[in-house]
Image (tube, rainbow, N blue to C red):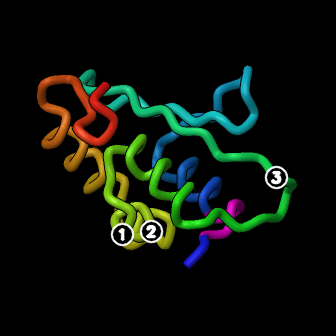
């Protein structure tokens, strides 16, 4: 089921990501020096739906599975729990979903 781009944007900003001032749809988040998460929201107009295949890519960049990413967007997954997952999964500094 597609996600609303406005809801994704709102959730990412609310959960500690910062919009890159050089790229209006690029988001970054540092997690306790363990990892820097970077994702991009594909721009297709101000109002659009993000299909699961693109949301899956965003989820991987955020060190999450698609179901977790959807919970992040719906506010069921808190910023604190997200950070804990990233610290756990990226203990060596690499995101296992993107191998970076």
Mark 3 surroundings within 10 Å by alpha-carbon count, few (fewer than 14), some (14 through 19), many (20 or more): few
Name the residue rendered at 65%, 46% in the picture: 41
Is residue 52 shown above or below 41?
below
Quadrant position of the N terminus in the picture: bottom right
Q: Is mark 1 on a helix, strand or loop?
A: helix
Q: Residue 37 carries which label?
A: none
Q: Earlier in the sequence, mark 1 or mark 3?
A: 3
Which residue is most to the bottom?
A: 1
Name the residue rendered at 41%, 33% in the picture: 37
Q: How far apart are marks 2 and 1 (CA)?
A: 5 Å
Q: Is mark 2 on a helix, strand or loop?
A: helix
Q: Earlier in the sequence, mark 2 or mark 3?
A: 3
Q: Is mark 3 on a helix, strand or loop?
A: loop
Residue on which the image places disc 3: 44
Check if mark 2's residue and mark 1's residue have beta carbons within 8 Å. yes
Left or right placement of residue 24 versus residue 27 in this view: right
Image position, residue 3 (x, y; %): 60, 70
Image position, residue 90 (x, y; %): 19, 34
Quadrant position of the C terminus in the picture: top left
**What range is drawn magenta here?**
3-7
Check if mark 2's residue and mark 3's residue have beta carbons within 8 Å. no
Residue on which the image places disc 2: 70
Q: Residue 67 carries which label?
A: 1
């Amino acid at each position: 089921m597609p996600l609303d781009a406005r809801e994704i944007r709102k959730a990412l900003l609310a959960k500690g990501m910062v919009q890159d001032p050089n790229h209006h749809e690029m988001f970054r988040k540092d997690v306790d020096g363990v990892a820097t998460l970077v994702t991009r929201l594909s721009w297709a107009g101000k109002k659009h739906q993000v299909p699961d295949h693109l949301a899956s890519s965003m989820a991987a960049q955020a060190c999450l599975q698609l179901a977790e990413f959807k919970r992040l967007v719906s506010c069921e997954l808190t910023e604190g729990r997200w950070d804990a997952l990233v610290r756990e999964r990226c203990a060596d500094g690499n995101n296992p979903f993107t191998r970076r």
